[in-house]
Amino acid sequence: MLQSLQDIVLVSLFFGISWLLLSLSQRWAKSKTRLSIPRIGLDPKVVGIEACKQDFLINGYKYVQEGYKKYKDSMYLVQTADMERIVLSNKFVEELRVLPESKLSTRFAMCERHLGHYTTLDVVLLSHLQNDVCKVHLTQNMPRLIPGLLDESGYAFEQQLGDVTAESWTDKHGHTTILDCITHLASRAFVNKPLCRNPSWLETATGYTLDVFALAGVLRDRSWLIRPLLYLTSSARTKLHSRFKLANSLVGPILQSRMREQQSDNDEKPADLLQWLLENAQGDDRSPERLIHKLLFICLASIHTSTMSACHALYDLCQYPEYAEPLRQEIKGAIREHGSLTYAAINNLRRLDSFIKESQRINHPGSLSFNRKVLENIQLSDGTLLPKGSFITMPTAAISMDPQYYPNPQEFRPWRYFDLRSEKEENANRYQFTSTSASSLPFGHGKFACPGRFFAAGQIKLLLAMIILHYDVKWPEGQVTRPQNVYIDERIGPNRDQIVCFRQRKEEELPLMIPNNIPSS
Ligand code: HEM
C-alpha cells in the first residue's frame, strides 16, 4: 500500500516537473523571437507584464489611436490586456483574409486571448458547428424566423415598455431595455417558446458571457504558473459552473425529447437554432452537454454585441430626431408593399440599414478586430515575417474614422451608405450593414467574418422598426448631447446609465404588421 502511494507521488512529481520544464522552454523559445516592430504603450520588459496589462485596460483605446496616427500604413506592437499583438495596417487584410485556418486562426486567437481552457471557450476548437449553423441555417431560415421574432418583440415590449402611454413621456434605461428585447428575440430564434420566456433562461443567456469575462479577468493578468490554483479557488469559476448546470437543466429535457422525436417519422421539425445544432452535430458534438455548450457560446457571441449596435442606434434616434420620420415612412412603405414586416420587407429598409451602419461606424464595438493567431510563419507582401505563435489584429475603430475612407468622418450622416448604394447599380448590394471590407471591419472580414451578422442585421432592424413605428423617443429634459461611450480595455460600449424617454404613438397611425398565424415552434 505504502509502496504504491510512493509510486503515485513519484510519477506525479515526474509529470509535474516535465510539464514545468516544457512550458518554460516554450516560453523561452517564444521570447527569443523578438520582432523589430515599433511599440506603442508600455513595454513589459521595462514595467512588467502585469502592469502593462492593467495599464491597457485604461489606456488601450488611446494607444491604438496613437499607433494608427504613426503607423497606419505599416504595423506596431502593443501589449494588450491579454496578449502582445501586432496591429497591422488594413492594406494587408486582402492577402490575410484568404489564408487557411491552418495558418491563421480566429478560433485559436479567441480561445487563447480569453483563456478558453479555463473559461470554457475552448468548445469552439472542438468543431465548426457553431459557425456553420449560424452561417448557413440561421441565415437561410430568416424568412421563417421573422413572424416569431415579431411576436416576441410584441411580448418584450409588453414586458419592458408596457407602462408607456401616448399621453406623457416615460423614462426607461436605454441599455437595459434594448438588452432585454434582444435577449428575447435571440432566445426566440435559438430555443423557441416556451423557454425563450423563462426568466431563468433569459438570465442564463446573458449571464454566461458575464461569467466567462469575469473569470478571464481574474486570471489573465496573473502568471500562468499560479493560474491553475487561482482557478480552482475562484468564485467566478463556481459561478460559471453553476450557470452550466442550470443551462443543462433548462435545455437538456428539450433536447432529450427532440432526440426521441428525431427517431420518429414526424416531419414537423421545430425551426430554431437548437434544432439545427442537433441536426447538424457529428460525433461527440451530439451529446446534450456539448450542444448546450455550443448554444451558450452562440449566446455569448450574439446577445451583447447586437445589443450594443441596437442601443447605439437608439441613442442616435434621440440625438437626431429629424431622421425618425423618413425612417418611419420607409418602414410603412415596406409594410404596405409586402403586407407585413416580412424578411423581404426588412431587407428593403435601405435607409434604416444605412442608419444602423453609420451608427456602428462611429460607435465601433471595439478598437481592434480581425484578431488571429499565426499558426505558421507568414511572409507578408512587404517582406515582414509574422512569426508562428504571434497574434495579429487591426485597428478597426480608427480605420472607420479615417477621412481617407469616410469624408467628414466625425459627422453622423445617416444616409451615407444609402447614397452609396443608390449611386450605381453595381453598388446595390454593397455597403450594407452586413457588408465587410478593408475599411469596414466591425464583423471582421473574409472566410471567418462573423457568421451571425445576417441574423444580427435582421433582428436589429426588426427591433428598431418596431420602436420607430410604435414610439417616439427623446433624451430627458435638458439633455442635448449623446452620452460619451465607455472605453474599457479594447471594448467600446454605449453608456449603460443613459435614460431614454418613450411615448407611445397614436394607435390610428399604426399599420397592421403582426401576422395572425405565428408558428409557435
Ligand atoms: C452587431 C452584432 C455583432 C458583431 C459586431 C459581431 C462581431 C463579430 C466578430 C468581429 C467576430 C470575429 C470575426 C473575425 O475575426 O473575422 C465574430 C465572430 C462570431 N460571431 Fe459575431 N457579431 C455580432 C453578432 C453575432 C450574432 C447575432 C451571432 C449569432 C447569431 C454571432 C455569431 C458569431 C460566431 C459564432 C462567431 C465565431 C465564429 C467562429 O467560430 O470562428 N455574431 N462576430
Image (cartoon, rainbow, N blue to C red):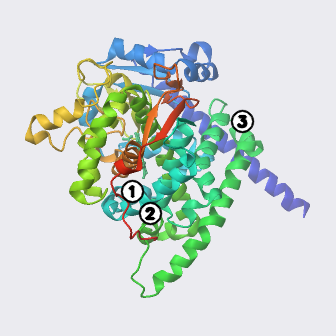
Q: Which type of secondary structure does the marked residue at label 1 adopt?
A: helix
**What is the count of numbered marks?**
3
Q: Which one is earlier in the sequence, the residue at label 2 or at label 1?
A: 1
* Residue 333 falls left or right of residue 128: left
* Dot 1 crowding, Cα within 10 Å, few <14, some 14–19, many 20+: many
Task: Tell me where residue 272 appears, x and y as whole percent.
Answer: 44, 65
Q: CA distance from mark 2 to mark 1?
A: 8 Å
Query: Which mark, by number, is residue 134?
Result: 1
Select label 1 or label 3 by which is in front: 1
Q: Is residue 67 visible?
A: yes
Q: Which one is earlier in the sequence, the residue at label 1 or at label 3?
A: 1
* Residue topped by disc 2: 273
Q: Amino acid at mark 3?
A: Ile
Q: Residue furthest bottom?
A: 265
Q: Amino acid at mark 2?
A: Leu
In the rendered view of the protein, which quadrant contains the N terminus?
Answer: bottom right
Select label 2 or label 3 by which is in front: 2
